[in-house]
Amino acid sequence: MHDTTRLRRWVHILLLLFLDVVLATVLVLIVFFIVYEMPSTSPNNLTNTKSITSGLSPSSSHSGEITHSSDWRSKFATHFTSKIVSTANSYSSPNLSIKISKHTIGNGSNTLTYYIADIYMADIKSFQTHFANNTYDGGNQSLAEMSSEVGAILAMNGDSYSLNLSHLNGLLVRNGTVYRTNFTNADICVLYKDGTMVTSSPSSFNPQQAIKKGVLQTWVFGPKLLDENGRALKEFNTWDYIRKNHPRSAIGYFEPGHYSFVVADGRQDNYSRGMLLPELAAVFEDLGCVAAYNLDGGNTTFMTLHSAVVNHPSKPSKKIMDSVYIAEPTN
């Protein structure tokens, strides 16, 4: 009888301990979701990505108006054409100029193949981003499908924002709408509504000041690739895995209205080995960019022109979470 009572007591204690563990786990998951996953505005408020006149989150006092850049049209007039002219590797119109060039260096197992898109635009409305399935945290979709849906002329994968937990979280703004304002220890890239693009280290970035200035897009992956003088960095704020040879996707900035997309293929013998960060940074320095930023790469590296994939991805069937794209401006 005594042994039975003792057994019941131990069963009761173990049950209480088990419930404590379950409760603690649930609380941790709730906190994790609130801190790292919950957007600062409701995903149901996602605006049509063909319009970038959406305001900031309700907590922001900024008007959300976009600075129109009519001076870009005259400044870059020699790059535009009076009618649409489209080829297999270029596109021009009264609003846009896009030229894609293919580059191959090395040979054999050391071959590296990458693509550069040189972009001029008359209006910042042409610079957009898109979530897979047009929904915040909406899963995955092929870049070709996304490009077709939004009428993109040129598109590239983004930063896989939905995987950017804990150390890769930060301020997420897409098409002028704020989705989260969390902490990050990663470099951040910000495109402002006046067309300027800035890459910042986490210690020097103030999200509230950025929002007040008028953020159009942010990306939190990195690292940034150039210093304040447009020189290729030698050391990078990232983790060891990202420092290795990989397929790459990156964005560069010359001046308001002039940008560059770069994708490097990799993981394919005798075609392209992938690119190291110093090599990627050197590409942007050689181009003359004043800022450049590494996006998610690896198997998510894609570039499309008119919804047709330009590069040769290591996994062509891979679906991705978000995209950066260039389109004709809309009202």
Image (tube, rainbow, N blue to C red):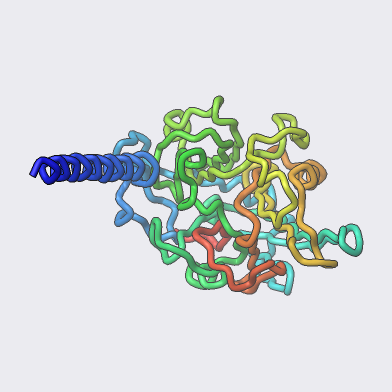
Question: Considering depth in this image, is 115 or 124 the residue closer to the camera?
Answer: 115
In the image, is residue 169 above or below residue 305?
Answer: above
| Residue displayed at 35% across by 56% down | 46
Q: Is residue 151 visible?
A: no
Which corner quadrant holds the N terminus?
A: top left
Given residues 198 and 294, the one toward you in this image is 294
Horizontal side, residue 153 vs residue 288: left or right: left
Q: Measuring from the top left, give residue 132's x and y in whole percent.
A: 46, 63
Residue located at (45% from left, 59% from top) = 131
Q: How many marks?
A: 0
Q: Is residue 101 above or below residue 277?
A: below
In the rendered image, residue 325, in percent from the top left (x then y), is placed at 57, 59
Task: State which quadrant residue 238 falls in.
Answer: top right
On the question of residue 67 being in view, the answer is yes
Location of residue 71 by image quarter: top right
| 100 or 265, nearer to the observer | 265
x 48%, y 71%: residue: 149
Left or right: 294 with respect to 56?
right
Name the spot of residue 42 as percent of width and height, x first.
Answer: 30, 50
Q: Residue at x 61, y 72 (%)?
A: 306
Instruction: Spot the residue most to the left.
Output: 1
The single residue placed furthest to the right in the displayed view is: 107
Q: Is residue 22 above or below residue 312?
A: above
Name the residue nearer the viewer: 196 or 108. Answer: 108
**Position in image of residue 49 (x %, y %):** 44, 59
Left or right of residue 196, residue 193 in this image: left
Question: Which quadrant, please, contains the C terminus?
Answer: bottom left
- Which residue ends up furthest to the top in the rendered image? 204
